Image (tube, rainbow, N blue to C red):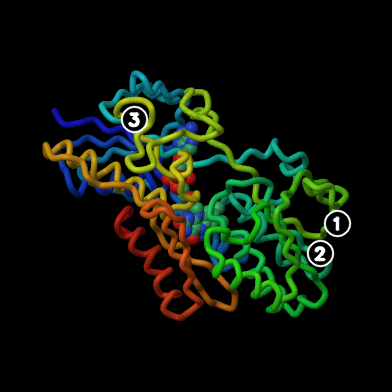
Amino acid sequence: MSERVLVLGAGFGGLELASTLSEELGDRVQVTVIDRSDSFVFGFSKLDVMFGHATAESVRLRYTDIAKPSVQLLRETITAIDPQAKRVTTDAGVHEADTLVVALGADYDFDATPGLAGANEFYSVAGAARLAGIIPTFAQGHAVIGVCGAPFKCPPAPSECALLLHDELVRRGAREACEITFVIPLGRPVPPSPETSEALEAAFAERGITLMTGRRIASVDPAAGRTTLDDGTELSYDLFLGVPKHRAPDVVIESGMTEDGYIPVDPATLQTAYPDVYAVGDVATAGVPKAGVFAEGAARVVAQALIARARGEDASARHLGQGTCYIEFGAGRVGSVDIDFLSGPEKTGTFHAPSAALVAEKERFGSTRRARWFGA
Ligand SMILES: Cc1cc2nc3c(=O)[nH]c(=O)nc-3n(C[C@H](O)[C@H](O)[C@H](O)COP(=O)(O)OP(=O)(O)OC[C@H]3O[C@@H](n4cnc5c(N)ncnc54)[C@H](O)[C@@H]3O)c2cc1C
């Protein structure tokens, strides 16, 4: 009998896990991946969509295009997870597994920030698509880019948003009539990498973007065009671009697997407190930032453990928390930061200044995954 691996979520983590198991084990494994959506979208594509560089439709990668031996993709909504029994209930039925991998990502908690539901956010595809119609109409006044809570996905993304908004306003000749303020609850734009933070702070200063660190958006009043920060500061705005507070999906919280909001795992192996149940990516507390590149790295470690078990070998792969995040600096320039959180005693983040080589590398990051996961 081949091992039944049930993967919950077809994002960065779930797609990488299913692809690796299919390639390495073929019919020695039966992989079932469940996702409620019909398509995957790279996080960075949301910035392309909001600034009109791509349409929401063009950045969707359809799950129906996936054709991998031993992998079955089901479009169902997960309604209950029993980690003890490794049993999952969906709107279409019940699934049982030998190994369960939770890769359901982080959801957005709009209710945690009063008024946010009626304001604009750019962290969902729908929010980014809506903004594609609004940003072109903003030609004067105050734009506030504001983060409603940490941790949040891809810590550099709101900085990228501020720099890309600057570009967009310059392109339309509207920059001088506009102010841009960026509010972030972290002490610096990318805390584990002082060099990256310095480069971003310098880029904001050069462009006249006001940076407010160590504060978060506490509430938004879209009718009045006003947001209040957690220290009581009030900012009037004409354009608000928000990052909602994140939390684990309800179904994960209801499963009883979470502590302090997310699923605790052994950072080296991604095992949860339940035998043969793993959690990878944004849904887990694994000592790494919430970003696709780490979800994917974690999934590879779980894949290696399952492959070793199927081959009767010892599992030796350890999650080192390493990965490269690309950062849009505006004007078509891309820098990067190499994160290494778990391999040594110190968390490190090595900055690489924007270059043409990094523009090509970021493009390759997307195209290799499109090819590997979707055959596109
Ligand atoms: C603006 C922006 C820019 C970003 N840029 C980058 C970047 O440059 N590099 C990078 O590495 N990361 C980036 N990220 C972060 C990245 O997108 C996420 O960290 C990554 O997708 C996490 O992967 P995951 O597998 O944990 O979860 P996800 O990719 O979020 O996948 C979770 C899946 O679970 C499914 N799901 C959830 N609940 C249910 C349910 N109840 N039933 C069925 N299915 C369900 C969802 O539909 C989803 O497909 C960015 C994010 C944003 C928002």
What residue sits 45% from the left and 23% below the top?
80
* Quadrant showing the C terminus: bottom left
- Label 3 vs label 1: CA separation? 47 Å
- Label 2 vs label 1: CA separation? 7 Å
Q: Residues within 10 Å of mark 3 (few under 14, many from 20)?
A: many
Q: Nearer the viewer, residue 194 or 158?
A: 194
- Looking at the picture, how far across and down is residue 59, in whole percent? 48, 58
Q: Residues within 10 Å of mark 1 (few under 14, many from 20)?
A: some
Residue 148 in view: yes
- 332 shown above or below 90: below
Disc 2 target residue: 142
The quarter of the displayed image where residue 177 is located: bottom right
Eye-nearest disc, 3 or 1: 3
- Label 3 vs label 2: CA separation? 48 Å
Disc 1 target residue: 236
What residue sits 46% from the left and 31% below the top?
77
Count of labels shown? 3
Q: Earlier in the sequence, mark 3 or mark 1?
A: 1
* Quadrant showing the N terminus: top left
- 154 shown above or below 178: above
Disc 3 target residue: 277
Q: Are marks 3 and 2 in contact (CB under 8 Å)?
A: no
**Three-letter amino acid code at disc 2?**
His
What residue sits 41% from the left and 48% below the top?
295
Q: Are marks 2 and 1 in contact (CB under 8 Å)?
A: yes
**Three-letter amino acid code at disc 1?**
Ser
